[in-house]
Image (cartoon, grey):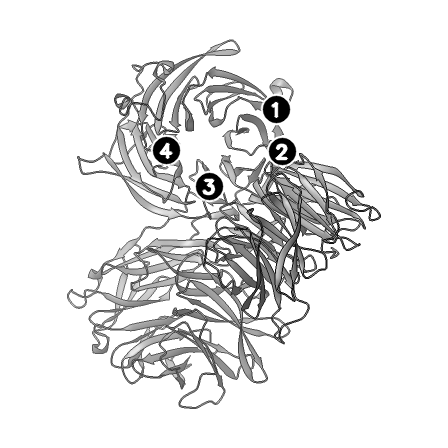
Amino acid sequence: MQHEHHRVPVTALAFLQQDILLTGEGTYINAYNGECKLLISVLVFERHAVHGIVVCEDTVLVWSGPLTRSFHVDISREGDLTLTLGDVQSVGDWILDAAFVSTCEGPRVAGIVTAHNALWLVKIFSISTTGCANATKLERLLPGSNCILYSAHIQWLSSSTCLIASGTAFGDIIVWSATLTADGDTFSTQCQTHYTFSAHEGSVFGVHISSPLTLPASTTERRVLASCSDDRNIKLWDISDLSTGCAALAEIQRDTGVGSAPGDSSGLAPPCLARVMGHTSRIWHVRFVLSACGSELERLLSFGEDASVITWTIRRNGDPSHLPYAFEKEDVIGAHSGKHIWSVALSGAGSIATGGADGAIALRSGNQHTAPVRQIPWALLNHTGGGDNFRAYCFVDIDTFVATTDHGCIVVVNLTRESGLPSVTELSGPISGLRGYSVIASAGSVAFIAGTDGAVFSYAHRTEQFSKLIHVDGKTAGLFTCDNSTPGMALLITSVGKRSAELLLLDIDPESAALIVTKTLHLDLPLGWLVTTFACHVGADTTSRYVALGSRSGANAIYHIHEGTTSDAIDCTLLNETVHGKEAVTTLNWARQEPVAKPSNWIFSTGRDGTLAVHQVVVRDGQMKLHLAHQLSLPFGPNIEGLDLSRERGLTAWGFKSKHFIVYNISSQRESVSVECGGAHRNWAYQPMENGGTFVWTKASKLYRKTQSTSSYELLNHGSHGREIKSAAVSSASLERQILATGAEDTDIKLFRLEGGGFRCLQTIRRHNTGIQHLRWSDNGQYLFSSGGFEEFFIWKISSGVPYIDTGVTCESKHPRSGASDLRIMGFEVDVEAVSMSKSSSPCLRITMAYSDSTVKLWRYQGQTWELLVTADYLMACITHVAGLGESSSAFITAATDGHVAHWEHNTQHGQLRWTKRHKVHQNAIHATTSHTLADGSTLFITGGDDNAIGISRIASPEQETNTLLIPRAHAAAVTGLATVRVGECTYWLASAGIDQRVKLWEISIDAACAGVEGIAVRRLQDVFTAVADVSSLDVCRLEGGGLGVVVCGVGMDLWRLPSVGRMNRCDEIEV
């Protein structure tokens, strides 16, 4: 097997020469350049993930657990990298940190700190000195102690003295130094403990020592220690005083944890400068960010289990009763999904790289700091002599918006003055109809304003023309615009108490350049409707228009307006009342899919139910229908307020999550803007642009704005799940493009496609409330089935060819008892019934479900209707898997935690279900199964157990005895994943994986002439290490360029290419 690609937690990062990033991804070191291009990938350790990387010019030291390895880097003029690896050596204890001596001659020297506070020295000799590749020499300078460390940081004060901060598992911090004296080829060491103190109420997960620096409002140079902990606190300590008056390290060491006297080290604690509680969970790392001159502390970065990066500014605290300094949160970046930022690196140029448990690498350059929030003072409204304030506003340009005031004035606000203070230009003095109430909307560079008296005004920003457009009856309830209704634009006006809405078709007068109304139409609204959004689209024949309206009740209405229509009240052509449940529809957008043989129209909508929905408009025989192609929840909300369809930016949505305004790129599945504004219930306006936009909002009667023109971060590779994957399934090999579905403990289901040698995420399904237990595709690849805890079971309809998102997903149905109990649906089998129960096009499915309480239930599903056929009980063991038995529609097999395989029969005439026999295969739980029907009708049923064995059973009829060929000690730990490939008439390849992180390939040969397992021969072909921990599942997929591969899923994903054979078939006998 050949390794192709993996997406595993990124556990180590380091910058090489400012613009090259070295990453530790599993057992590999990868190098990326400034354009996020992978330069080289090198296997460093055979069976251990890389945990740390330190760099000194062209020499690199990496470690994994107790192992270390160095390599030399050569960079060609073309930018190509060559790595010369040294030998693997061990220090015998877990390595926490290492650092090179930057001012030494001869061999490179680095200090290493281990989990028991031992100090080691490693010398790395160059090739020219030794004649071999990076020879290294290890020497232990200081033995370990009886403390257990969770973190450490080593910093060299000179070529012979290093300063070390160690954080213990019980909340203590030890600050000590070691001075080295050379004695020939060896060193003698003198050590001194400077501080030993109780710093936190939880384990100290991160410590970081600064270089000498100055704090804000201070000229005194200090050395500062930052620490973070399980208690979610970040603290700064002044460790400038490194006097030698304390006891030696061996004398000061003490027991930590239960039994140590509280406050017994208070006299040895350094002054605490500042502290703050940050993040929503544990904090793993802290780092200092210095000014350009490198001597003044500007910011502190913290990296948490919540997968976020918080930037803190430090200010002088004016209250003498508090700590001298205080933290202020500047911004929060959430580049990773799920949990954990495992690795951090800062370059000399200020770039910040983070690696997460999701396998993503986020890179934030030194000039990608978030723009500050600025207030727009109401004092700029000086036309009334004071007392006025902004009321409603909308953008007419990227940096210009039109606003109404409480006094009824209309002003234009430009945000780009060099002084930083916006300029305000008055369009109109107080208008009585706008005093105290106004509504405003814009389309492109044109704004429309209305109030209580029915007058509607327009302002064209390009020509700076302001005029009264039209007068309608009654108080205006809402203005809705659409500027993609070529030719011209459209304006929809709704009035309080009226059952109709006025649709104005607008254009520009070629002579006066004024905005004129070319046509007025009246749309009859459904009973009780309150319009919340509007979209207009010109039909393919250019002679008719389609108008879509969204309501506060979650419904959509479509009007088909033919050319020449002059009716006073145009009735609704199609009403869809269940688009977004009972929540308001907030955005409607028409999209036209071209070029295709038959152009089609699509409607994109968002609602306050937190979902994005995509409908295809189908017109047949004069009848219009909507086909739902996609509807999924977005990762923020539920207040989704806007949507932008752009060929350059892709599909972008924005809205509110808790107290933040969020802009989310659906196409790239990443958050691009996050602004803490107080929440959704306020006036606001947003103008999108490349990599950001301008956001204006009202908070506590004050107007604020924030502009972002660059992305907060770049992704070197996109991540997958933030928690361990529990199940994976690949769609049928008969499909042109296979899809890999993965379900994880983070409750998400992700759909991937193999592209460009890696995994490209197509969609993320967020519907389950518990971790996923099992996934399965239908044979035609149009349906995906998923199960989890709380009896959750969903049927997903998968569509292709959806514009902007490619793959559409809708929830066709959920199990009627989903959420009704705490039972888990451990596994299930889906069969298409031979006889359809109705003439409906919906498939009639028989679904066999295995529950965690040892029960089995058979359900019939068709057309969103569920029918419970029968229920039966097993023994006291939890059933883990269900599989069909040959061609029989009434028999199936189950595997359970008691190590037995049970044969079940369903008597359809009497409605009875019972297990007829059970066969012991494993000593305890069965974790993985795969099966295949042989030519003689028998079933080859392969199981992997908690006893580390693989069982190969040949199951014929219930009357015949079941035989098993057991492979003991197939793995060194539980076998949790199995997948099979047919490579010959009677030959199969079996791929197995276990908790031991080994992937093995077996060949199974079957002699059909022999009964039972007598004719089965097994031999092991290959045995490789996978960087995926806690393997949960395997499946076979088709690779780009031909051939088959095995996907290994657990804590990450790993892809291996299988050896090529003349003809390879999946176990469903579909030729690849």
Quarter placement of the N terminus: top right
Q: Which disc number belongs to residue 294?
A: 4
Whole-number angstrom distance, CA of label 3 to CA of label 2: 34 Å
Question: Dots 3 and 1: beta carbons under 8 Å?
Answer: no
Q: Could you classify mark 2 by the number of other residues whose Cα lies within 10 Å: few (under 14), some (14-19), or many (20 or more)?
A: some
In the displayed structure, would residue 929 be above or below residue 438? above
Q: Secondary structure at mark 4?
A: loop
Mark closer to the observer (4, 3): 3
Mark 1 or mark 4: whose residue is earlier in sequence:
1
| Residue labelled with disc 3 | 354
Tag count in the figure?
4
Q: Residue furthest front?
A: 910
Mark 2 or mark 1: whose residue is earlier in sequence:
1
User: Mark 3: which amino acid?
Assistant: Thr
Identified at 48% across, 19% down, the residue is 120
Q: Secondary structure at mark 3?
A: strand
Q: Secondary structure at mark 1?
A: loop
Place of residue 126 in the rendered image (x, y in percent of width and height, measured from the top left): 59, 22
Mark closer to the observer (2, 1): 2
Whole-number angstrom distance, CA of label 2 to CA of label 1: 27 Å
Q: Nearer the viewer, residue 238 or 174?
A: 174
| Residue labelled with disc 2 | 972
> Which quadrant of the structure image shows residue 156?
top left
| Residue labelled with disc 1 | 87
